[in-house]
């Protein structure tokens, strides 16, 4: 398995599927791939997907992540962003690496921890997926009980919130219920391509402050 894995080249925007991968094999593969890599994995009951994001995927991920961090800072909320950390639950035989994720409500419960195990630790409060490569696996996030999933696809933000164990589309964020972000986040992402990242983040912070004054 490992010899074959090392020979696999996954071009940007493409993915490979490996079937009948046991949990122990998954653990070994993750160790072999290492933490500092561009590839992402998704594992669902024996099927392992390995994909390489496109450059525009990485740009969208960076800007939206920065916007969320700016928002949390303006709201003076403690948070931990863990990037593409591998989240997995052996009992459910599922695992996923989001493009970005945030611990917000549960930040204090994982503060200081170097490794997370979703059989005992809470899942992230918010996960972010850029769907340029049609990679997102909402069913895995749903099974892992991630309360909120943002999926950005074709210039639009889709907010999924967990309700009775199932994701439903929502116009508002579970973590930021008093702010209308579904249109504002995509607008600022597009602005960043024209006026630059720093100016965009500054403008977004101004918008957030204005909303807070009005509330």
Image (spheres, rainbow, N blue to C red):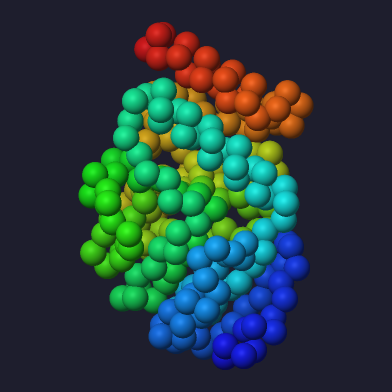
State the residue in front, 52 or 168: 52
- Please provide percent x and percent y for residue 190: 70, 31
Q: As drawn, is 183 to the left or to the right of 22?
A: right
Q: Residue at x 68, y 39 (%)?
A: 155
- Please provide percent x and percent y for residue 158: 55, 42
Q: Residue at x 61, y 72 (%)?
A: 50
Q: As drawn, is 125 to the left or to the right of 11?
A: left
| Total numbered badges shown on the rendered structure | 0
Q: As drawn, is 87 to the left or to the right of 183?
A: left
Quadrant for residue 19, please give it.
bottom right
Q: Is residue 139 visible?
A: no
Task: Find the residue positioned furthest to the top.
Answer: 214
Against 146, residue 71 (above or below) is above
Q: Residue at x 59, y 18 (%)?
A: 203
Q: As drawn, is 186 to the left or to the right of 32?
A: right
Quadrant in which the C terminus appears: top left
Q: Is residue 214 visible?
A: yes
- Please provide percent x and percent y for residue 43: 49, 73
- Please provide percent x and percent y for residue 87: 41, 63
Q: Residue at x 34, y 75 (%)?
A: 90
State the residue in front, 24 or 155: 24
Against 156, residue 140 (above or below) is below
Against 113, residue 56 (above or below) is above
Quadrant in which the N terminus appears: bottom right
């Amino acid at each position: 398995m490992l010899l074959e894995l090392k020979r696999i080249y996954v071009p940007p925007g493409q993915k490979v599927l490996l079937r009948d991968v046991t949990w122990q094999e998954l653990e070994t593969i993750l160790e072999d791939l290492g933490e500092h890599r561009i590839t992402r994995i998704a594992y669902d009951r024996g099927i392992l997907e390995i994909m390489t994001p496109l450059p525009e995927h990485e740009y969208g991920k960076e800007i939206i992540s920065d916007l969320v961090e700016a928002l949390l800072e303006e709201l003076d909320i403690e948070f931990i962003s863990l990037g593409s950390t591998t989240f997995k639950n052996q009992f459910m035989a599922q695992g996923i690496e989001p493009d970005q994720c945030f611990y917000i409500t549960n930040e204090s419960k994982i503060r200081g921890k170097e490794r997370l195990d979703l059989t005992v630790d809470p899942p992230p409060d918010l996960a972010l997926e850029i769907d340029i490569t049609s990679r997102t696996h909402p069913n895995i996030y749903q099974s892992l009980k991630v309360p909120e999933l943002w999926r950005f696809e074709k210039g639009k933000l889709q907010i999924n919130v967990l309700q009775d164990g199932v994701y439903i589309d929502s116009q508002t964020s579970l973590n930021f219920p008093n702010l209308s972000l579904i249109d504002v986040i995509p607008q600022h992402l597009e602005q960043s391509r024209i006026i630059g990242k720093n100016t965009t983040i500054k403008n977004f912070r101004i918008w957030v402050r204005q909303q807070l004054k009005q509330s």
